[in-house]
Image: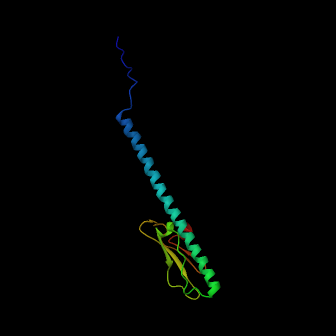
Amino acid sequence: MIRMRARGARGFTLIELLIAMAIVAILATIAVASYDFAMVKTRRAAAKGCLMEGAQFMERYYTLHFSYADAELPACSADVTDFYAVGFADDPTVDAFTIQAVPNERQDDAACGTLSVDDTGVKGADDVAACW
């Protein structure tokens, strides 16, 4: 005698598989966007650290030479220089300097833009409160 399968013992339907794939795709999109946002924030933090190291270097230079003029910034690490151009906004003078980190095309940082710090410790960005 041949047994017939019960009607309820079938596999997944095509509609169910498409819905499951759509849910996975939505979750993957959210995860990638969150990852990109986290990477921008991480690179921004590295750039801020490099700016602060540069400002501290300039202060040490000033205590030895009584001037900021003719100072050269130490190089930042590759995790900063790959995404930001770090340097002086203008040539340092005897009593003032401004160091800035300008994001390049690999660092899409529209929220903050160019980060900066000067000899008085004033920090700059498009949105200073959110970025520093």
Horizontal side, residue 18 vs residue 112: left or right: left
Q: At 42% from the left edge and 43% from the top edge, which residue is drawn?
A: 23
Q: Is residue 121 visible?
A: no
Front in this rendered view, residue 4 or 106: 106
Q: At 39% from the left edge and 42% from the top edge, which residue is drawn?
A: 21
- Residue at the right extreme of this rendering: 63
Q: At 52% from the left edge and 74% from the top edge, which residue is drawn?
A: 75
**Up-down relation of residue 130 to residue 54 (above or below):** above
Please state the horizontal and vertical placement of residue 124, each as a whole percent of the image.
54, 74
Residue 67, image quadrant: bottom right
Quadrant where the image shows the C terminus: bottom right
Q: How many marks?
A: 0
Front in this rendered view, residue 5 or 8: 5
**Up-down relation of residue 116 to residue 20 (above or below):** below
Residue 128, image quadrant: bottom right
Q: Coloring scheme of the render?
A: rainbow
Please state the horizontal and vertical placement of residue 98, each as a whole percent of the image.
54, 80
Please state the horizontal and vertical placement of residue 7, each as a whole percent of the image.
38, 22
Horizontal side, residue 31 vs residue 69: left or right: left
Please state the horizontal and vertical placement of residue 102, each as a whole percent of the image.
47, 73
